[in-house]
Amino acid sequence: MIISRNRKLTWIALLVAVGLIIFMIEMLIPRPLPWLKPGLANMSTLAALYLFGLPEALIVAILRVCLGSLFTGTLFNPTFFLSFGGSISATLMMFSLLKLLPQTFSIIGIGIIGAVSHNVTQLALVALLLMHHSGIFYLLPILSISAIVTGIFVALVTHALLSYIHKHLLAL
């Protein structure tokens, strides 16, 4: 699909805005554990990956994390770096699997891999930068279960969104 540069920039801005709105709403959802978040805003990155590719998905992820951190007052604090690292690694992993094994992984598998890699990266960053200890990886089973559930949900909603976009909006 070939679209104009202006239209592409508009779509990227829209995906960043939607991801940011979802992030801000997600901040209001009560969490069973303070550090356990669904990551629903990753729908915008996953959609950008499927609609455009890696560069645009990275732009959406970076802008979403930076603006979300700016709005919540966490820009350049440890929370920002954990979110930034997790988002970048998730985007790169999703792209890698999408391009290297397109017949093996559906959007659900890609969503799960993105969520799991996000969590693993965050745990690694906590171990390296904050705790200087690998004990944090004991949280991996809890985070993996959560990642599988939210990865499936994010992928299903993104799939429905992509179907709608392809059917109704990109035809304009």
Image (cartoon, rainbow, N blue to C red):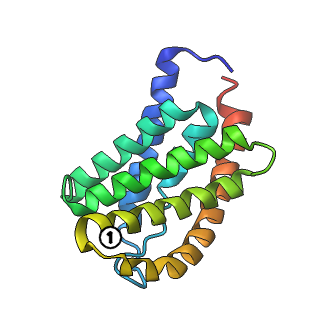
Residue farthest to the right, as pictured:
103
Say few, some or many: other residues with alpha carbon within 10 Å of mark 1 (under 14 / 14 to 19 / 20 or more): some
- The answer to whether residue 119 is above or below residue 60 is below
Please identify the quarter of the rendering in which residue 162 is found: top right
Residue 88 point in image, percent of width and height: 43, 47
Give the residue drawn at x 58%, y 39%. 49
For the residue pair 93 and 62, the one nearer the viewer reads as: 93
Residue 44 in view of the camera: no
Give the residue drawn at x 42%, y 35%. 59
Residue 63 in view of the camera: yes
Give the residue drawn at x 47%, y 55%. 41
Residue farthest to the front, as pictured:
133
Residue 125 point in image, percent of width and height: 34, 62
Circle 1 sits in a helix, a strand or a loop, which is it?
A: helix
Q: Quadrant of the N terminus?
A: top right
Residue 101 point in image, percent of width and height: 74, 44
Residue 57 point in image, percent of width and height: 50, 38
Give the residue drawn at x 74%, y 35%. 167
Q: Quadrant of the C terminus?
A: top right
Left or right of 171 in this view: 92: left
The residue carrying mark 1 is: 127
Please identify the quarter of the rendering in which residue 50 is found: top right
Left or right of 150 in this view: 15: left
- The answer to whether residue 73 is above or below residue 47 is below
Left or right of 78 in this view: 30: right
What amino acid does circle 1 point to?
Answer: Ala
